Image (cartoon, grey):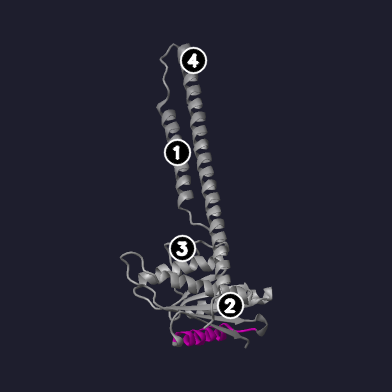
Amino acid sequence: MRPIETGRRRMNEQHASHRRDQAESAISVSELNTLTRCVLARMMAGLSLSLFGFFLALCGSSQAIAANHAGGVWAVPLGLLLLVLVLLLWIWLRADKSHTDDNSSPTVGPNGSDQDDPSPAGCEHPAPVIGEIELHRLVSEQIRRCSIQSSVLGIIGIHCDRRGQQIIDQVQRSLLGLARSRGARLLRRQEAGLLVLAPGQRPEQALDLAEDINQGLISMAVPAENAPLGITTASIALVLAHPSARHSASSLLEAVDKTLETARSQGGNRIEVLEHYG
């Protein structure tokens, strides 16, 4: 078992607090941008209403002058009036739709993907279950990226004892936010629980992330009021691979499974680390 040092834990808590502050600041900026777009849309709608009102008054005045000179009675053509009303209604609905789209549009994550793949804790959409072919493709892509970056590929496999799918989904959403804050990518693998890919990170960064996930699982093991105990134990397998060895996705996933099985056999909350070279 790898001990978790108190100093490192405090440093991780400080980093987590700083990341939360950054996330709140980003949310505030996003809300301000949405509010600005909404105000501009309303202003444009109001300006359009004023212009069409002026146009209607101008047409009415022209018709009145023409009718008076002709000795008839002033009247605004019904067709023109209906056309103006339809245009006003279209402009108002368009502005209202723009405001609704701004409020309902998904948040974009740091990698340019929608935040339902990656969202902080509280996201309503868990990561999707993926097949073996897609999993191998994603792992191979991360190996290629790490080879270009000349760094270490860290793969973290997580197995949780659970009581009910709803609890596991809540844990998964929380881990997703934690992994995203470290630049990692979270995938769900049916037989191995959760799989976190941490590309382009140094070994100590991947280890810090594994330890943070372990601490997060321990904290989530404490039940809320009137809630059953969801997580009792968790096993975490961390496999570090140097890209120069040109690993295949299959060999790395096999190493994750073996390391995770070793952690499970030991029992309790445990991190098993394997440096995989070939």
Q: Which residues are magenta?
A: 246-264
Q: Where is mark 2, residue-wise?
A: 154
Q: Quadrant of the C terminus?
A: bottom right
Kind of residue at disc 3 = Ala
Q: Are marks 2 and 1 in contact (CB under 8 Å)?
A: no
Q: Where is mark 4, residue-wise?
A: 65
Kind of residue at disc 4 = Ile
Q: Where is mark 1, residue-wise?
A: 92
Q: Are marks 1 and 4 in contact (CB under 8 Å)?
A: no
Q: Position of residue 2 (x, y in %)?
A: 54, 81
Kind of residue at disc 1 = Trp
Q: Earlier in the sequence, mark 2 or mark 1?
A: 1
Whether 270 is drawn above or below 98: the answer is: below
Q: Residue at x 44, y 33 (%)?
A: 83
Q: Earlier in the sequence, mark 4 or mark 3?
A: 4
Residue 258 belongs to magenta span = yes
Q: Position of residue 14 (x, y in %)?
A: 56, 63
Q: Nearer the viewer, mark 1 or mark 3?
A: 3
Q: Are marks 1 and 3 in contact (CB under 8 Å)?
A: no
Mark 3: secondary structure: loop
Q: Residues within 10 Å of mark 4 (few under 14, many from 20)?
A: some
Q: Residues within 10 Å of mark 3 (few under 14, many from 20)?
A: some
Q: Residue at x 51, y 44 (%)?
A: 35
Q: Residue furthest left?
A: 226
Q: Nearer the viewer, mark 2 or mark 1?
A: 2
Between the residue at mark 3 and the residue at mark 2, the CA separation in whole angstroms equals 22 Å
Q: Earlier in the sequence, mark 1 or mark 3?
A: 1
Q: Residue at x 54, y 47 (%)?
A: 33
Q: Which mark is residue 121?
A: 3
Q: Nearer the viewer, mark 1 or mark 4?
A: 1
Q: Earlier in the sequence, mark 3 or mark 2?
A: 3
Between the residue at mark 1 and the residue at mark 3, the CA separation in whole angstroms equals 37 Å
